[in-house]
Amino acid sequence: MSVSRSSRPEGAEPRVGVWLVGARGSVATTVVAGRAAVTAGLHAPTGMVTETSLFADSGLPPLSSLVFGGHDTVDCPLPKRAEALAAGGVLPHGLPTAITSELAAADREIRPGGPLPGDTRDPDELISTFTADIQDFVGRRGLARAVVVHVASTEPAPTGSDLPPSSLYAAAALRAGCPYVNFTPSTGLHHPSLVSLAGSVGVPYAGRDGKTGQTLLRSVLGPMFAQRALTVRAWSGTNLLGGGDGAALADPAAAAAKNAGKERAVTDTLGTTPEGQTHIDDVPALGDWKTAWDHIAFDGFLGTRMTLQTTWQGCDSTLAAPLILDLARLLTRAHEAGLTGPLTELGFYFKDPLGEGPSALGEQYAALTAFAERLRGRARGRRSGEPVPEHAGEANL
Ligand SMILES: NC(=O)c1ccc[n+]([C@@H]2O[C@H](COP(=O)([O-])OP(=O)(O)OC[C@H]3O[C@@H](n4cnc5c(N)ncnc54)[C@H](O)[C@@H]3O)[C@@H](O)[C@H]2O)c1
């Protein structure tokens, strides 16, 4: 698909915020660096679906209008983090120096996250602090709106009723009236005590866990086996990765949420759960580079046994960053257009999509296409000055 102008003409555009929770991590740093590289014309927007003709005239905010800020619990400056990523081959050599002012500007907008070790603040105090930080960012920088994107380390699923950190941030996003994206398998808005608040606040939200590699492939291959009436007997997978994500996923409780999303793609697309498990191994030497193997045992005509094996070798942060830029623009535009609730049409982007949408990538792309058309219709209405009808069920997706 050709790359085309998807956003409104620059100049007359209000600036919009992207508040990254986990702002000093590999993914967040690659988002900030990637946006700067693309807007400076240093690199093409490869991997950004919102830069293709699908989103032409959908009224998305220009990339240049995005202003970054966020929370993190560590204090490594973003320019230094970017240098480390360049040394590991994640970012092109020389890029951190070329865009150092953009990295420094985003760094100035990062506030201390939590809870920190020994933190005595109760959950409500933490939520209030996070909310105030986001509201201060929006007010001080004169932003039209801000989207909160969760890209912090994967946490284990909560066992009790306490809100885990990801849910504290999700609650803060709701209190601040911000659209919200959970790009991780962490709980976020999925906590039972946030469900009714999420329904009443009236912001759009999307999640969860970005679909960047192995699961992307599964959402293509699963439908292929089903449509060709081939019987999958077992689907097994192993992932090797390092970096902060690899270290966090070395905790079996944290990896469980990630693997559940990967296995869901197989079950949903095949309509059955074959034998086999998915594993994640932390290999620090690999840094941000991931190898994912899948071994699929299937039966053909007359019960003939066959296998398909796939090897995906990818750089995790550079696979994730364009999707996060897409999601930030889409959620911003959806908020501006008055859409609220779970954006189930964005299942294309997630391992464990919200709601009852399709699991096959082709069908998810069709849903995304319909979403782009809906945004286009609203943008046309805005240009012509005609009121855009709010159909029942349309604003509340
Ligand atoms: N890269 C991919 O392809 C991909 C795909 C899907 C999901 N994800 C998810 O994105 C997340 C980030 O991945 P990464 O590679 O950037 O990891 P990372 O370890 O490099 O970065 C995570 C950041 O979160 C910060 N953090 C931890 N606890 C926090 C808290 N309570 N508040 C604020 N910040 C906190 C850490 O200090 C760190 O800077 C992970 O959950 C990962 O599973 C990544």
Image (spheres, rainbow, N blue to C red):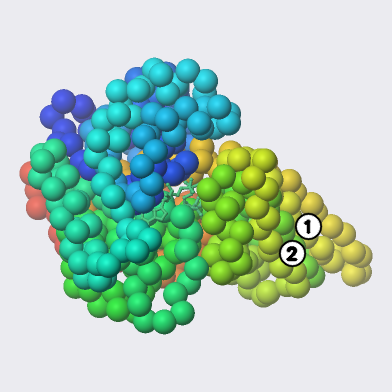
Residue 249 as seen in the image, left or right of residue 63: right
Neighbour tally class for label 2: few under 14, some 14-19, many 20 plus, Cα within 10 Å = many
Residue at x 21%, y 70% (from the top left corner): 124
The mark nearer the N terminus, 2 or 1, is 2
Residue 164 shows in the view:
yes
Q: In x, y percent, where is residue 193?
A: 30, 78
Which one is in front, 342 or 102?
Answer: 102
Q: Residue at x 24, y 64 (%)?
A: 126
What percent of the width, then of the height, locates residue 58?
28, 42
Q: Secondary structure at mark 2?
A: strand
Which secondary structure, mark 1? strand
Q: Position of residue 385 (x, y in %)?
A: 8, 44
Q: Is residue 232 above or below residue 67?
A: below
254 sits left or right of 143 in the view: right
User: Which residue is under mark 1?
Assistant: 295
Determine which quarter of the picture holds residue 218.
Answer: bottom right
In the picture as drawn, the residue positioned furthest to the bottom comes out as 160
- Dot 2 and dot 1 residues touching (CB under 8 Å): yes
Label 1: few (<14), some or many (≥20) within 10 Å? Answer: some
Q: Is mark 2 within 8 Å of ligand 1?
A: no
Please give the name of the residue rendered at 28% of the width and 50% of the height, measured from the top-left corner: 112
Residue 201 appears at what percent x and percent y? Answer: 18, 68
Q: Which residue is mark 2?
A: 235
User: Which amino acid type corresponds to the residue marked 2 in the rendered image?
Assistant: Trp
Q: Residue at x 42, y 30 (%)?
A: 80
Distance in Å between CA atoms under marks 2 and 1: 6 Å
Nearer the observer, 285 or 119: 119
Q: Amino acid at mark 1?
A: His
Question: Of the numbered discs in the image, which one, if any, rests on residue 61?
Answer: none
Residue 209 shown left or right of residue 225 in the figure: left
